[in-house]
Image: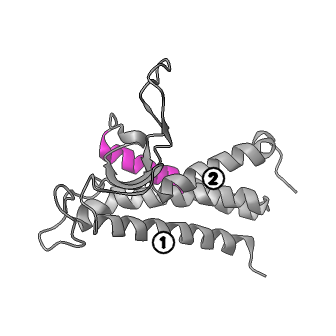
Amino acid sequence: MMSVGKKSILLILAVLVVDQMLKIWIKTNFELGENVRVASWFYIYFVENPGMAFGMDFIPKTFLTLFRIVASGAIGYGIYYTVKKQYPMGFIACVSLIFAGAVGNIIDSTFYGLIFDSSYGQVATFFPADGGYAPVFQGKVVDMFYFPLFTFPEWVPFFGGGIFFSPVFNIADSAITVGVACLLIFYRKLLDDKKEPK
């Protein structure tokens, strides 16, 4: 029977492989801003996030990437600790999803500027002969999932005419969101309890 630690590693690797394969495919097949309509409420829409969530960039890029690396290291240690202390597999899976998502976006921020050229007005080249579009730690995160579920009627206060759920996101973002949500929904008591599980 596979150990909890091995299951955690496999989950992390699965998320990272799918996340990076999809991002590389998007970068090498889409120009920035290009989109494909899958349904009226779902598009594959290529955008690049230069900074924090939702494109915020009030923190210097290098500092933000280094902070992500340190935070991911802490989460990685958390996985080791929870496996060692025999936390429930579901709890460990949630933390593993958060870790995998964080690392997936760190790969973009750290290396994509080096291994791709610009996507502005062209499809990017993987390992271009003339070098990438930015130095190490200055890469942009690739996002592609867009779910404009519906538009608010004009008469709705504050949101009139706006799109419900307008962020564009990726597999890594989804892993983080699912991991955090499941921790809060299913393991809130364990998070609040200072005692370690038996």
Whole-percent x, y for residue 8 in the image: 65, 68
Q: Residues within 10 Å of mark 2 (few under 14, many from 20)?
A: many
Residue furthest to the bottom: 1
Magenta-drawn segment: 60-73
Q: Secondary structure at mark 2?
A: helix
Left/right placement of residue 196 relative to residue 82 reads right
Q: In terms of depth relative to the viewer, which is nearer, 51 or 169?
A: 169
Give the residue pinned by disc 1. Answer: 17
Type of amino acid at the residue the image marks with label 1: Val
Say whether residue 163 is magenta.
no
Q: Quadrant of the C terminus?
A: bottom right
Vertical relation: 61 (above or below) 136: above
Whole-percent x, y for residue 64 in the image: 38, 44
What residue do we see at 41% from left, 54% from top? Answer: 43
Q: Secondary structure at mark 1?
A: helix
Corner quadrant of residue 83: bottom right
Q: CA distance from mark 1 to mark 2?
A: 17 Å
Give the residue pinned by disc 2. Answer: 179
Vertical relation: 191 (above or below) 1: above
Type of amino acid at the residue the image marks with label 2: Gly
Q: Quadrant of the N terminus?
A: bottom right
